[in-house]
Amino acid sequence: MNSSLNAARRARELAETRDLVVDVLVVGLGATGAGVALDAASRGLSVAAIEAHDLAFGTSRWSSKMIHGGLRYLAKGQIGVAYESAVERGLLLGRTAPHLVRAQPYLLPLLPEVSRRHATLVMTGYRLGDGLRAAARTPRHLLPGPSWISAQQALALASPLGSRGLRGALLSWDGRLVDDARLVLSVARTAASHGARVLTRCRALEVSGDGALVRDELAGETFTVRARAVVNATGVWAAGLHPGIRMRPSRGTHLVLRPETLPGLTAGLHVPIPGESNRFVLVLPQPDGRVHVGLTDEPVDGPVPDVPQAPEEDVTFLLSVLNSVLEEPVRREEVAGTYAGLRPLLDGEGRTSDLSRRHALLTTPDGLVTVVGGKLTTYRRMAEDAVDLAVSLSRLDAGRSRTAALPLVGAVPDDGRDDGRDDRNGGRRRGRDGGGDGNGGRGRNGRRGRDGGDHRAGGGGGGGTDRLLERYGSEAGAVRALMAEEPWLAETGPTGVTGAELVWAVRHEGALDVDDLLDRRTRIGLVPADREAALPAARAALTY
Ligand SMILES: Cc1cc2nc3c(=O)[nH]c(=O)nc-3n(C[C@H](O)[C@H](O)[C@H](O)COP(=O)(O)OP(=O)(O)OC[C@H]3O[C@@H](n4cnc5c(N)ncnc54)[C@H](O)[C@@H]3O)c2cc1C
């Protein structure tokens, strides 16, 4: 079946869903719910998946976009969680989403504040992480091993680092997403290609084990969806639908810097937080050239807002840790945007940063299954577990999960990548020698590094081939073809997004309004001034 989502398909499938009893109703379309829809649909079950707002409206778009190997869980002795993360990372990198997930180098700068003992301890952790990679059978060419590099090599990868007292850096690698909202979109479209009805702007008002009362937020009408099994995947909002669950959300804030604020940053940075031995502020160069800096971990009480806001104290904290390693400090007025997300943690003892990131499955007596917690990296495994439970509780006729071997929409087969992109994207090739040359993410084409030149992971500006390949994979050609239809479709806006991408999002990616286009199908909206500038193009795309 076609994977395209759009207003016409939504209207048709919404009408069908009212008269059907589906096998599985999924509530919430973040990474977890989209994963559940895909897992169930690809087992041959009939699926309706509803979302109150838009795909990836919730926490899934506010992440650090890292596909973790689970190192920090290893440090806490949560070996199972760490291994599960490493396995899922390997699947995403190598099989299911190689177009969306890349290897990203990170540096821990060895400044005087980092003692030799501390550095050795961190390197031991990185080596254990590399052992996890090997245990998860992720090949080195997808994810190089860690190494010590010199100060000169560190500055070549991250020229904004202060050179005074810099004696080198620890280089490590992990997975990173081109865009978290895009992962959700790809999973949801893949589910749609297996027949799932993906219905945005449909809010569950009440849920039970055999269906839900739903409000179509566009038409304002309520109706009932009947189902043999129901999975609540509403993340930090899960307690609102499942009696007895207690959540303890924790806020993570990121800063968004424009490309020109920290030029010459190819590698990400792990910046030690003063007074903490195993916590770091992350400096995360993005494929669009912006740099994100995160993240905090603060417990929050009270009602869960639709869109959390970043408080000024988080901004001050992140800037002060960031500036501790820079030659020239970033000023408050250079922070072009901020975003905050709430981790969907189940209530437990201790600091929120200590709560287990393992996911949980909970059921009500009438058979409602709630899947909560976990993280973006493990969405597939969470979904598999939730569908296994729903199938057994509701005695559905379904086989085993197939998603570990199921490429997402746009995935380019492994050997299809040897087309020259490897030399520009994330160091896959370079890593084949084990990544120990300290060359990190530089040297793809010799342009990255201290010159402060082009440091986008895609290498190119608007509609550039690399950029489109990284975001659209095998669909990049179709997006490029759309650019030829009219001059404005090839024009680029902020972050290099073309008009064609906006029109593509309306026709194939289920974007229904300017917010969907600017805040989720593209991430232009992370910088409010850029969002304002892109509004006319977004409006034009909706009526083209
Ligand atoms: C700041 C931060 C950084 C993070 N960084 C990373 C990272 O780098 N790597 C990683 O692996 N993980 C990371 N995580 C964790 C990860 O982002 C989350 O665990 C994951 O995105 C949760 O996805 P979800 O689908 O369960 O929830 P959500 O993405 O929140 O999805 C729930 C959806 O349910 C919808 N919904 C709510 N109520 C209803 C209703 N009544 N009817 C219909 N729909 C409803 C919401 O609109 C929402 O879209 C991070 C988390 C935070 C907060």
Image: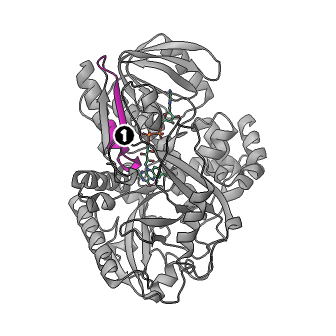
Magenta span includes 532: no
Image coordinates of residue 56 in percent, x first then y, are: 52, 40
- Residue type at mark 1? Leu
Image coordinates of residue 31 in percent, x first then y, are: 44, 41
Image coordinates of residue 541 in percent, x first then y, are: 72, 40
In front: 398, or 490? 398
Label 1, residues with CA under 10 Å away: few <14, some 14-19, many ≥20: many
Any part of residue 291 in sight: no
**Up-down: is 357 above or below 15?**
below
Residue at the disc numbered 1: 346
In magenta, the rendered stretch is 365-383
The residue positioned 38% from the left and 50% from the top of the image is 377
Q: Quadrant of the N terminus?
A: top left
Task: Kindly indicate the quadrant of the structure image that contains residue 233.
Answer: top left
Magenta span includes 369: yes
The residue positioned 34% from the left and 37% from the top of the image is 383
In front: 356, or 229? 356
Q: Secondary structure at mark 1?
A: loop
Image coordinates of residue 455 in percent, x first then y, are: 58, 71
The residue positioned 47% from the left and 67% from the top of the image is 420
* Way the structure is coloured: one colour
User: Number of callouts in the render?
Assistant: 1
Say whether residue 374 is left or right of residue 212. Answer: left
The residue positioned 44% from the left and 25% from the top of the image is 241
Q: Quadrant of the C terminus?
A: top right
Say whether residue 124 is left or right of residue 64. Answer: left
